[in-house]
Image (cartoon, rainbow, N blue to C red):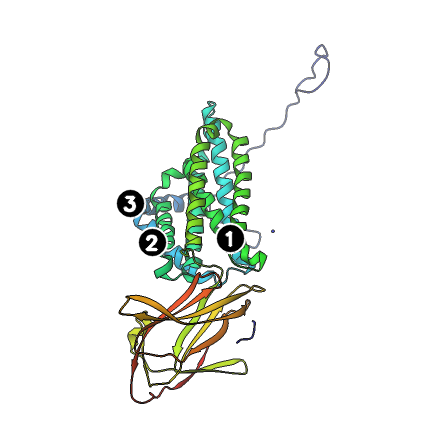
Amino acid sequence: MEDGNKIAPRGSFWRRAKPARIEPVVAAPEIESGPVRTASGESAVTPSQAFAAGAAAQPFLKAAFGWIVRYERQLSGAGMVGGFAFDDWNFRRIDLPNTQFVFIGYLSLAAISILILHGLAERAINGKPMPRWHGILPMAAQFALGALWSAFLVFYSRGAVLGASWPFLLVLVAIFIANEVFKKYHSRLIFTAVLFFFALFSYAIVTMPILTRSIGAFTFIFSGIVALGVFALFLKLVKKIGPIEWRGARWWIALGSVAVYAVLNVFYFTGVLPPLPLALAESGVYHFVAKSGDAYSAQDEAQPWYTRFGFEPTLHMAAGQPLYFYSAVFAPIRLSTDIVHRWQHYDTARKSWRTVSKVTFAINGGRDGGYRGYTVTHHVTAGDWRVDVDTADGHVIGRVNFAVEMVPAKVAAPEQVLR
């Protein structure tokens, strides 16, 4: 199929004091108002000039801060979109060390901010004043969690099929937006702790297959256990730092965490959760596909321009002509698993999809462009078709929809090299 691919002085009180020594008075030198020369002879800025420059800059800074405050909501929204676009460009692969360092850094920043803020809230309960800088902590927690949601959206959307995974993607988008809208709630332990567990579990789901080099139900369950264990250690620190506030929030945190754990499990076992870290890198339906050496070539029928924007193509097939489906599935390095090409034809009488053929083959991770392979079906009829690229346990990695029209003779299809 494919090639794999950080006190005073001590002494007696009764001892006679020595007469004070009178030091000569030296007149302080006058500050020159002219330019000061440095050792190299170059002119330096005088204090009066520096003061004048600072005074001149104050109106500009005041206007800039006023503009930022006036358009805070619009700037926040633009920052959200820009941050997501930057993450989409920056995060190429989930298994790269720099990507993992960024994820761990965001999680650590969120945890530390929550713990310090919780400790300061406990001090306030005991009557001690809050330090002036405490307002930075909710902002730090919001930034870290927002960056995590942005990164999760990038990776989960890459490995998701909208028709199958839209509930989970909708939840991620809602949390991503709510993280910005409900800024004031980041100073509350319950809100941030539950969000932190959601981020922790989502990260474990993505990362554990890289460590175990396997994917499936067992790996997902193990991810949940690891996330619960780390979160339990985090809550022990919360309890130790602030036992008074912890007693009032513990049951709400437990309820929220159980809800998050249950929802993610339901999403996984109903096929809603994308099967990360697998992702469909490239796919297509062709009149013919062949492998020569390390390259794949295909005969591709010309399609209208709008098919580049997600509209399904139409292939014109002659009777008895086979149809080929090509896919390149990304998997992390040293991860091996089975994938399935499931050919389905829409039954207009039953108004449902009918599986025509199913082909299973193994893939090996590591190649940037994904592990390549193709399958073929000879049972071609007119109508709506789709090919699902699934995991062995039925999770949809990708889906390609297309239509078939039968014609009397074979259509000319130019050859192209596939990635």
Looking at the image, residue 83 sits to the left or right of residue 100; the answer is: left
Query: Residue 315, how many percent across, how many down?
Result: 32, 80
Q: Amino acid at mark 2?
A: Ala
Inter-mark Cα distance, 3 to 2: 14 Å
Label drawn at residue 78: 2
Position above or below: 132 against 295: above
Please tell me which residue lies in front, 248 or 258.
258
Residue 251 sits above or below residue 402 on the image: above
Question: Any mark on residue 220, and which?
Answer: 1
| Outermost residue to the top | 14
Question: Which callout, 3 or 2, points at the residue further toward the start of the chain?
Answer: 3
Give the distance between the C-alpha atoms of the residues marked 1 and 3, in whole angstroms.
46 Å
Q: Is 336 displayed left or right of 169 in the figure?
A: right
Question: In the rendered view, does 356 fall on the left or right side of 369?
Answer: left
Q: Is residue 403 visible?
A: yes
**Residue 14: percent from left, percent from top:** 71, 10
User: Do tag 1 and tag 3 residues touch (Cβ < 8 Å)?
Assistant: no
Q: Residue furthest front?
A: 349
Whole-number angstrom distance, CA of label 2 to CA of label 1? 35 Å
Q: Is residue 409 left or right of residue 225?
A: left
Q: Residue at x 52, y 36 (%)?
A: 235
Helix, strand or loop at label 3? It is helix
Label drawn at residue 337: none
Counting residues from the start of the chain, the first of labels 1 and 3 encountered is 3
Residue hosting label 3: 70
Callouts 2 and 1 close, C-beta under 8 Å: no
Viewer-proximal residue among 141 and 366: 366
Query: Residue 236 or 343: which is nearer the viewer?
Result: 343
Residue 184 placed where, x, y %? 36, 38
